[in-house]
Amino acid sequence: MAITAAMVKELREMTSAGMADCKKALSNTDGDMDKAVEWLKENGLAKADKKAGRIAAEGIVCVKVSDDGKNASIVEVNSETDFVAKNEKFQTFVGSVAAQALTTGAADMDSFMKEPWIEDSSVTVEENLKSMIATIGENMNIRRFEKLSEPDGVIVSYIHAGGKIGVLVKAKTSDASDSVKECLKNVAMQVAAMSPKYLSTDDVSEDYKKSQRDMLVAQAKNDPKNASKPDNIIEKMVTGRLNKELKEVCLLEQTYVKAENKENVGQYIKSVSADIELTGFIRFETGEGLEKKNEDFAAEVAAQIG
């Protein structure tokens, strides 16, 4: 029986499966719509639904920067195993997700998943993801995305360890020379290595400073070595420790890791060009905050033998 486009469209509307899956289902069931629905459940979307309960904490981070260097996106897409994360088909898919994120108008993940897929507007991002799950054979998840814009400067990206960490750095500058871009690339590498929380101490909230100060005061007073020290001495100790901690979590105040003279990141940037004002950064690390499956292969084999 000839499979028409109308039949494929009808099956897709009934099942929310991908167009290619619907065409294959109809071909394998001689165009029987009811049997095609069952075929999809058994061989496509049912598999995706079943795999959705598994932990997907591996995967990769991918970035996409516009041709003019003024807009960029960063995404994290998870898989169950590192083996799949290195799969070319998976990596191509994640690249397409990053391209979608660069042009998206969505403000949150729910809206993003409902958008027409960038490479096939007849399906949504979510539908295409389910099709990929069925094809690759393990659970996957588009976990998060963010966008950066710097109309008065440039954005530079850095990917570490094949996608384990991704960074975007933006700066206001009228100089888009190779030396400036190299400088920002070095700063992006700093972000990847040192994982700062803030751009500078000016961006640290008073609530964060207070909570850290209260914690340091409690620690100091509970230390037997400080039992005889008056409160004003403890206060000075705490202030010193807090300032040191802020330097560790604020990018511009961090010691530049490639420096030979202990200069900080802000000083390094100014040594390259006075016409660079760092205005923001984003750092994604694959699987951060996710529960990872603990594989005990010896126990698994022993259980099978027993």
Image (tube, grey):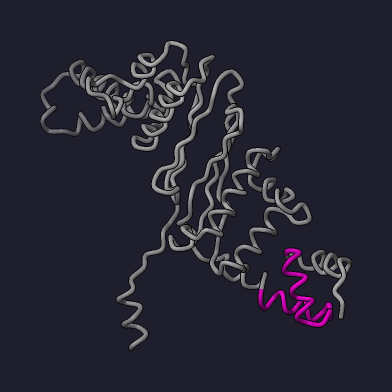
Query: Which residue shows up at 83% across the image and 77% down it?
Result: 33
Could one spot residue 289 in this view of the protein?
no
Q: Quadrant of the C terminus?
A: bottom left
Q: Residue furthest top?
A: 274
Q: Measured from the top left, where is residue 66 in percent x and y?
A: 61, 33
Most frequent secondary structure within the magenta stretch: helix
Query: Which residue shows up at 61% across the image and 28% down it?
Result: 68
Left or right, 52 with respect to 28, comes to left
Q: Measured from the top left, where is residue 137 in percent x and y?
A: 56, 69
Q: Quadrant of the N terminus?
A: bottom right
As for residue 26 lying within the magenta part, the answer is: yes
Residue 39 appears in which quarter of the rendering? bottom right
The one of 55 and 174 positioned closer to us in this rendering:
174
Q: Measured from the top left, where is residue 64 in percent x and y?
A: 57, 39
Could one spot residue 212 in this view of the protein?
yes
Query: Which residue shows up at 82% across the image and 64% down it?
Result: 13
The one of 286 and 186 positioned closer to us in this rendering:
186
As for residue 226 lying within the magenta part, the answer is: no
Query: Which residue shows up at 20% across the image and 29% down it?
Result: 221
The one of 160 and 109 positioned closer to us in this rendering:
160
Q: Is 290 situated above or below 276?
A: below
Q: Is 47 situated above or below 269?
A: below
Q: Measured from the top left, where is residue 290 in percent x and y?
A: 45, 53
Q: Is 230 situated above or below 58?
A: above
Q: Which residues are magenta?
A: 18-43
